Amino acid sequence: MRNLEINKKEFVALNYLGKESIVDSQGKRTGESKVLYGDEIVFKTHISGASGVAVIDSNGISIEYDKSFILTRYLFEKVGFTENTVFFIDKNPQYDANGQPLYDYKIKRIKDTLNEVLILLEKVRNN
């Protein structure tokens, strides 16, 4: 039932690329860095409602999370999500004056199974 088209929600993901040193007008490093993200990936899947209950299962005690979604292993490998991927789920993509994304969710944990990958998301409160 969760894979019915009517139950899917469109959202945007940004994959982490790395960090870049910030240089001043003279070309010298300032000691600060900025995070680099790839192009926006527009995605559509079923995202669970709010959650936050710890559950004991065969993998141990699961951590607290706010939302989750499931991808097939093939699709997960194709989109390249990692623990540093960020998402715009409850709001449209926004960026600050320096071009840094003001995302509202980040990955808390990725849980693998044989054929599917469970993505647990954590709400970012300061963006």
Image (cartoon, helix red, strand yellow):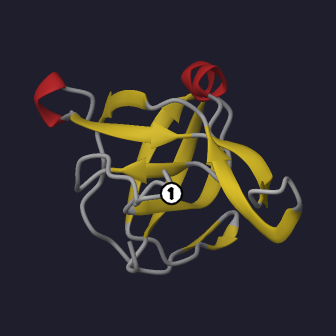
Q: What residue type is labelled 1?
A: Asn
Q: Residue furthest right?
A: 28
> Looking at this view, is 36 or 103 the one in front?
36
Count of numbered badges drawn on the protein? 1
The quadrant of the picture occupied by the N terminus is top left
Where does the image place residue 4, in percent across and percent down from the top left? 19, 26
Q: Residue furthest front?
A: 26
Q: How crowded is mark 1: few (under 14 residues within 10 Å), some or many (20 or more)?
A: few
Q: Mark 1 points at which residue?
A: 98
The quadrant of the picture occupied by the C terminus is bottom left
Where does the image place residue 19, in percent across and percent down from the top left? 77, 53
Relative to 5, is 111 on the left or the right? right
Residue 83 shows up from this direction: no
| SS label for mark 1 | loop
Where does the image place residue 93, in percent across and percent down from the top left? 31, 46
Rendered image quadrant of residue 79: top right
- Residue, x 42% and y 59% (percent of image)? 97
Rendered image quadrant of residue 9: top left
Position of 126 relative to 35 (above/below): below
- Residue, x 37% and y 62% (percent of image)? 104
Q: Which residue lies furthest to the left in this view?
A: 6
- Residue, x 37% and y 38% (percent of image)? 12
Position of 18 relative to 41 (above/below): below
Residue 109 shows up from this direction: yes
Where does the image place residue 37, in percent across and percent down from the top left? 61, 42
